Amino acid sequence: MAGALAGIKVLDLSRVLAGPWASQTLADLGADVVKVERPGAGDDTRHWGPPNLSTAAGEPTAESAYFQSANRGKRSLTLDFTQPEGQALVLKLAAQADILLENYKVGGLAKYGLDYASLRKLNPGLIYCSITGFGQQGPYKQRPGYDAMIQAMGGLMSLTGEPEGMPVKVGVALADIMTGLYASTGILAALHHRNRTGEGQHLDLALLDVQVATLANQAMNYLVSGETPKRYGNAHPNIVPYQAFAVADGHLMLAVGNDGQFRRFCEVAGAAELADDPRFATNDERVRHRQQLLPLLEPLLLQKDLDTWLAQLEAANVPCGPINTLDRVFRDPQVQARQMLVELEHASAGLRPYVGSPLKFSATPVDYHRAPPLLGQHTAEVLADWLSLSAERVAELHEQGVV
């Protein structure tokens, strides 16, 4: 069954994570995504190992796990557009494309005629998405932007970590990933606009903008109160109790979201009187009296083991969960039922496990049709498909070092 974006052509000049995350989403939706990479080197993340994939026989490959995480469903074309003939090929590919993604420094592609102002003359319907650290305007526009520094500059690290400890970054490159998600959302909106008007446009995504936007309730907490939010560790600034607690044999994440859930929790914990205490009866009061409530809850949680708490709180409809390591995550029956672990045939490593897409369509399901590509695996195929170049012409370009 064809995906929702079947027939859409994406020329992906992006590298590392934010851009590739966006183009992987488009590939999941059925677009034909061609990943343009430097001959001999490719995307930087190809070399961000170990760990690397291994073959069925246990032999190591040069394919990093990091690269595998963001490049499902694409075809790899190696092409040197710093050479005139390579530049000419990219221009021809861009003329055929519906969408182009890039994450070069501001103005970096203009010298090759691959900036939006140049390409819109060649292809007025082109949707051109630029991803940078700081955007196309502003005093920082020429600075490089990496996820960790963006988490720091954009405020996320100031909110993450124990109150008395150091600020801590999130354990995945969240600024990059969220930028990729915003990019794919913006691209789809621009595609809808083009379908109505025939007009393409330039989409300017900055990691810093996305990080500020995704501060969400914490940003509004500051803007409403004027008070700089502080770190709460595993607790929540606006809801109590909403944090990790030690139990008899481990830890439990308790996520009480309303007063009814708090009352039911207290009943399960054998402390129903806490729900009637004026200091704790409403969330507003629990937030104000956090320091009085938590010492009362902590010894209660230690009285039972994790499995008992999970069973009893689930039966009482009180949100909670174990703090799973990744081996437990992928063994979880709900994760498996939702097909968040899939298998794809990799060109050098054979059948390998991959993380699935969270998008579940009733009419146009995600088609896991292609594992992340080897470097240049589809060069001849793409040049034939998109530009109708003969095998002989591709061989000439290869001989010249263009592809």
Image (spheres, rainbow, N blue to C red):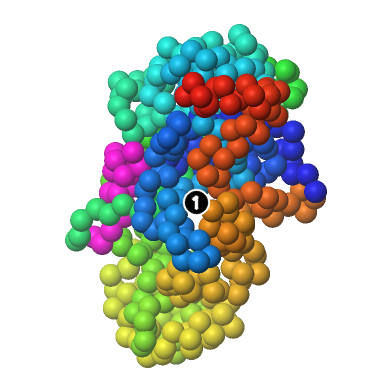
Examine the rendering and report whether any part of residue 331 can be seen: yes
Task: Judge by depth and name the residue closer to the eye, 360 or 402.
Answer: 402
Q: Was residue 267 drawn as part of the magenta stretch in this picture? A: no
Q: Position of residue 338 (x, y in %)?
A: 65, 65
Give the image quarter of residue 200: top right
Number of marks in the rendered image: 1
Q: Position of residue 100 (x, y in %)?
A: 57, 26
Element assignment for label 1: loop
Q: In percent of the image, x 44 and y 38: which residue is there?
A: 43
Examine the rendering and report whether any part of residue 229 can be seen: no
Lateral position of residue 129 relative to residue 218, left or right:
right
Q: Which residues are magenta?
A: 146-163
Amino acid residing under circle 1:
Ser
Q: Position of residue 68 (x, y in %)?
A: 50, 51
Q: Is residue 60 above or below residue 128?
A: below
Residue labelled with disc 1: 69
Q: Position of residue 93 (x, y in %)?
A: 62, 22
Q: In percent of the image, x 28 and y 49: which residue is there?
A: 158
Q: Was residue 154 drawn as part of the magenta stretch in this picture? A: yes
Within 10 Å of disc 1 (Cα), the crowding (few <14, some 14-19, many 20+) is some
Task: Judge by depth and name the residue closer to the eye, 348 or 277.
Answer: 348
Task: Judge by depth and name the residue closer to the eye, 233 or 94.
Answer: 94
Q: In percent of the image, x 27 and y 54: which residue is there?
A: 168
Q: In percent of the image, x 55 and y 33: which residue is there?
A: 77
